Amino acid sequence: MPPAATVAAGHGPDRPPGAVPAELLRRLRARTGGDTDPVTHVERVPARPGEQAPWPQWAPEELRAAFARRGVVAPWRHQAEAADLAYAGTHVVVATGTASGKSLAYQLPALATLLADPRATVLYLAPTKALAADQLRAVASLELDGVRPATYDGDTPRAEREWIRRHSRFVLTNPDMLHHGVLPGHAHWSGFLRRLAYVIVDECHTYRGVFGSHVAHVLRRLRRQCARFGRTPVFLLASATSGDPATAAGRLTGLPVAAVTDDASPRGGVTFALWEPPLLPGDQAPGAGGQAGGAGDLAPVRRSALRETADLLADAVASGVRTLAFVRSRKGAEVVAATARRSLDEAVPGLGDRVAAYRAGYLREERRELERALLHGDLLGLASTNALELGVDLVGLDAVLICGWPGTRASLWQQAGRAGRSGDEALAVLVARDDPLDTYLVHHPEALFGRPVEATVLDPANPYVLAPQLACAAAEAPLTPADLDLFGDGAKEAVDSLVAAGALRQRPTGWYWRHRERPDVDLRGEGGAPVCVVEAATGRLLGTVDGGSAHFLVHAGAVHLHQGVSYVVDSLDLDDGCALVHPEEPDWSTHARDVTSLTVASIRSYVDAGPVGLFLGEVDVTSQVVSYQRRRISSGEVIDTRPLDLPARELRTVAVWFTLSPESLAAAGVEPADVPGALHAAEHAAIGLLPLMATCDRWDIGGLSTALHPDTEAPTVFVYDGHPGGAGFAERAYGTAAQWLRATRDAIAECGCEAGCPSCVQSPKCGNGNNPLSKPGALRVLDVVLANLPAPGAALPRQGDRRSE
Ligand SMILES: [Zn+2]
Ligand SMILES: [Zn+2]
């Protein structure tokens, strides 16, 4: 612990730029005192001067003056470029960094059009109400005559809705409201839609996976309603930086979209440190040697990222540095804050009061109070979930600690971007968790600081999304054959299935919705009826958990968090769709484990690479949650494993898989007895690394490996989307297989452990208790695959498409 005297030093304008990050990093590094430096890489992202462009010729003086009043003298080059494209009628996505002024890029053409054409209208979509409210304030503050911006969402009073539909020319809403309110009520919106010039889709990278696939069809339904009035609005999208934003935006809208990615906004300097918690000495690792909890139990051989982050937070606060720590779970944020408070109080009683936890469940006033305290320096350290990520403005931080890879580069930069906005240099530290992807990233800084590879993926062809969306479309207006093109691949099959199920009736003029009530489709829900979470003592409904994850999250004995309050599940009644809980804050977390079997239903596409085969296709997965582990929150130590009695569930989804010939494995030195462990270890690490290629969470995907699969007749590793019908993750894995598996191999090879650990080949959700696993075998398996698979971009050997049922 640094001396208390440094507390008074504080942060002030008298320090030269760059002093805070350099000094703080030196201090944090010095503290560890071990043999190995926890810092694997330091990247100094230099300050960048901005590059301005003249106002476009078409931008009216009134609008330039309004922006000037807001302090914008001229647009940055990327803003002007995107605005020009959109004004000329090209669909465009601007994909640049946090705080690069993406909103000006869409406000400029949209508002210029509203001023030039007094009848035109604009629809703005945000993923959250908070973001729409921010945008409303920004547009309203321009005080442009006749624009009358207004939000239209679930909170809009009935009395105001009609006025907005009739008079507002800049309506701000969200995809859920578009789906539930605007499109079903299109008759009321005809005046607005027939004059619609632009559709602005803000933060469009948040529309990914199954939710993104739903939103893609909501946008197609919007395009269809506009087309009925002869309108083809221009789509203007804003995205965080990602791999291939034009393709993602094209999939989301169903239109060709141009991408503007060259960020010309100025940026403060950031010193970015990658931090790998040290391996614990053997005698300190709980469960080391496999004695404590039996073979295959997770032994946390590294210092936990939470503990490390808490110490870094305490050190930063003791140095008077305003620091924000991002932690993935709410419980984790509480642990980090409490641990930091405790160690600060031990050093200087009372100092712990300057650290707090922040989470989404807080009331608005509580959140504002914390934000104010941090801004004014009464509070120096805050541990938060990513609740701060969107929409909330928090400025004046010196350092940001990121506990564990937040899942995407977009989130990473958004979180790091919280520091140093006032122009001062800031420090950002990414603390690796014991996860293969984190291990890879702290050893491969180029994956973070070079060109992005992770793409926002969605799969509008998912039949489990397409059919309900077509039902919604038919309920809005009968479907015609031309509409099938609009909704894309699989639309005809989906319509046929709806006819067969009695939901649609086919007539000469098209397909008609047969029911009086509208189809009940939730954009964010999936996988069966939701399970209610009810407090047993009071009967109070706390919330719902979607049916697909109920077995995992609210089984008997599970620790369930609701708005930051911890509950323990007493019982799960699947017939009633109800989990009874009581409030309790145990110091362990629970982790469900399942067993899985899989059959191949069809092959969509394959690469025949000699002894290695790579496939993409549909599979049927049967899985059963059979037990759960209790793990100490602070250390990750496994307390015990308890059995569960839950029924098996079926999932038809999309998978990527690779096969190897037994001869190639033998030639690579994998003994037959070692094959299952080698494949299993490769599977775990491959699942862990897929989020590098696609914006998914490792919990969105599942896997299975076997030394002989009856359908492939070969040693096989499957990785599948954990959502009915697929969500685009396996497809992305197939498309980037060589890169993905190379990164997987590197992550395993670079982990400093001997026989495999949670940072490389162990998985927290393994149904087989991480047994068997062979780390050296996994490397040999991946070497065989990589030696045979064509390199990225190379011409593929024999490959094909084939469909069967
Ligand atoms: Zn390891
Ligand atoms: Zn496993």
Image (spheres, rainbow, N blue to C red):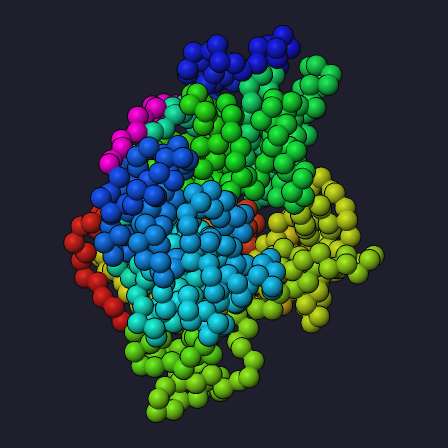
Magenta segment boundaries in residue numbering: 39-54
Residue at x 20%, y 49% (from the top left corner)? 793
Q: Classify residue 363 by image quadrant.
A: top right
Identify whether 644 is placed above or below 226: above
Provide residue 406's location: percent of width, then percent of height.
48, 40
Provide residue 525's location: percent of width, then percent of height.
54, 63
Residue at x 61%, y 53% (from the top left corner)? 592
Provide residue 674's location: percent of width, then percent of height.
42, 48
> Of 124 and 262, which appears nearest the observer?
124
Work out which residue is located at the far left of the displayed protein and give it: 795
With 67 as the anchor, is 649 left or right in this view? right
Q: Classify residue 91 by image quadrant.
A: bottom left
Which image quarter is the C terminus in? bottom left
Q: Is residue 43 magenta?
A: yes
Which image quarter is the N terminus in? top right
Residue at x 49%, y 57% (from the top left corner)? 173
Identify whether 618 is placed above or below 641: below
Provide residue 496's location: percent of width, then percent of height.
39, 83
Q: Is residue 795 magenta?
A: no
Q: How many marks?
A: 0
Identify whether 316 is placed above or below 209: above
Task: Say whether residue 260 is visible.
Answer: no
Residue at x 53%, y 39% (from the top left corner)? 392
Work out which residue is located at the far bottom of the displayed protein and give it: 508
